[in-house]
Amino acid sequence: MATLTMLARLVSFRPAHAKLLELPWSRCDAFPYGKTAMACICSDQTFMYDLLVIGGGSGGLAAAKEAVDLGAKVAVFDYVTPSPQGSTWGLGGTCVNVGCIPKKLMHQAALLGEAVHESTFYGWQLPDPKTIQHDWEELRTAVQNHIKSVNWTTRVDLRTKKVEYINAEAYFKDEHTLCGKMKNGEQKTYTAKNILIAVGGRPKYPDIPGALKHGITSDDIFSLKKAPGKTLVVGAGYIGLECAGFLNGLGYDATIMVRSIILRGFDQQMANIVAQEMERRGVHFIYQAKPSKIEKQSDDRLLVYWVDKDGQTHQDVFDTVLFAIGRKALTAELKPENANLKVVPDSGKIDAVDEQTNVPHIYAVGDVLHKKPELTPVAIHAGRLLARRLFGNSTQQMDYTNVATTVFSPLEYGCVGLSEEAAIAIHGDDKIDVYHMYYKPTEFFVPQKDVSNCYLKVVAFKGGDERVLGMHFVGPHAGEVIQGFAAAMKCNLTFPKLKDTVGIHPTVAEEFTRVSITKRSGLDPKPTSCCS
């Protein structure tokens, strides 16, 4: 043991001493001097890597960097197949390139446009608001420049941490071996003791004539070369609502085609309030309908046919058709059968237990997981915890309950915990109380903005400790509001404790501390004053 200790000190001193152990320094140069030399010496020499990560998105990168910090030798595969419209992007995954980040930036652009028009009520002297125009090309350029800066920062971060980046399309050769197909067609083989799948998913297209040729998805909208103009958004999930919302806010005619319900998986009362507010702002909705065909006209506009619930066919002309009908996991491309890896039919997702697939040393995190929240922070946290279990002797598992999220619709919707429907289904109507109220944001007073859809509710156990099961909020800054309450729910927040909390006045977040009327009581939940 003393000899091993001495050798470890020699290795940690400088690279030249690697020859003393007859080890190539490339096996050890991934580790900071003096910190993880023993981890390198003791690492399994059978494989090229301790961990291979497939997917350079948030979850995969978080796991890779955490693993390297804990002494593992790690490589990350990342390859973006162009969308049917030719869109592609750099390292960082969906969130950075075609998801959360550009979505929030365009949402912010829409909110700023709204604020510009409202500012005249506060004394700002502006040209006639009707003459103020938005420049799509300038916004797209600003958003893409920011994305490229994040891509570069991510590359630098991996290099600094000595995570090997492999720009290749990976697929399984066997349970411990991946083949990487480079852009030039060359293929290389890599082996690892552990493999992490973090490939996420890509948008689906409907199987109708013209969809692939003429339609776009969220993969394309943020880098669209020309202004989208009159846009049909097919799909009423959060991606569809967010895209239609910011397009409407930027001044474009936006229509949402809803096949069945708004925001499936979310509290339905809140979802319908979001839709009502969007309709009030000018977003059009076509309910219980499906597109059947898209044809390009001589003027390059798109003639869209759709069928309603009664089987009747309708048509209209749009400049852009954006599909937001769900996403499919990118597992088929991995050739999972070569590793005996099981995936869920149709969705292609992986049904894992604590990120562990049916193959002992193959793991998965992020959107590729079956029935887990498709949220960037979830993937990041799960990836880090997995790396700590694999390389840091940790036993902490990812907790997928009470994960907060926000729909960045024009009037935002933030929530954490159970919906009203889910709480009743699980615990029974007689065991649940739903506290609710409408409120008036101070910011809405002077411009006399419509407050009819500013609403919140708290779902809690009736009796006992009155533990809070779910919190839902539609209003300004919903994401910022719900984040703190999510921490409180992780600490088993009860309704009495919520009522004992002193609010910050005047804020919209304080409204949660003032809610007192239950739906069961039948009392009017509308406010009487700003300080009642």
Image (cartoon, rainbow, N blue to C red):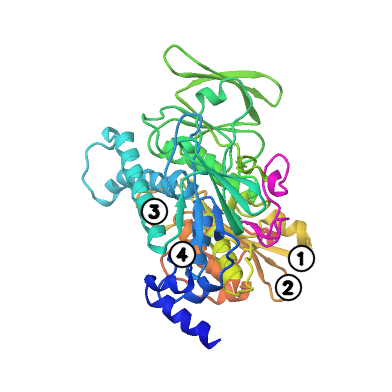
Res. 440 in view: no
The magenta segment: 337-365
Mark 1 crowd level (few <14, some 14–19, many ≥20, 10 Å Cα): some
* Residue at the spot of label 3: 155
Cα distance in 3D space between marks 1 and 2: 8 Å
Q: Is residue 357 magenta?
A: yes
Cα distance in 3D space between marks 4 and 2: 66 Å
Q: Dot 3 lies on which element?
A: helix
* Residue at the spot of label 1: 431
Image coords of residue 432 (percent x, y) = 73, 64
Query: In the figure, is residue 81 to the left or right of 195?
Result: left
* Residue at the spot of label 2: 463
Cα distance in 3D space between marks 4 and 3: 25 Å
Q: Dot 1 lies on which element?
A: helix
Decide: is 402 above or below 181.
Answer: below
Q: Dot 2 lies on which element?
A: loop
- The amino acid type, in three-letter code, at marker 3 is Arg
- Whether residues under marks 2 and 3 lie with C-beta atoms below 8 angstroms apart, the answer is no
Q: What secondary structure is the magenta-colored segment mainly? A: loop
Res. 431 in view: yes
Q: Dot 4 lies on which element?
A: loop
Q: Which mark is residue 24?
A: 4
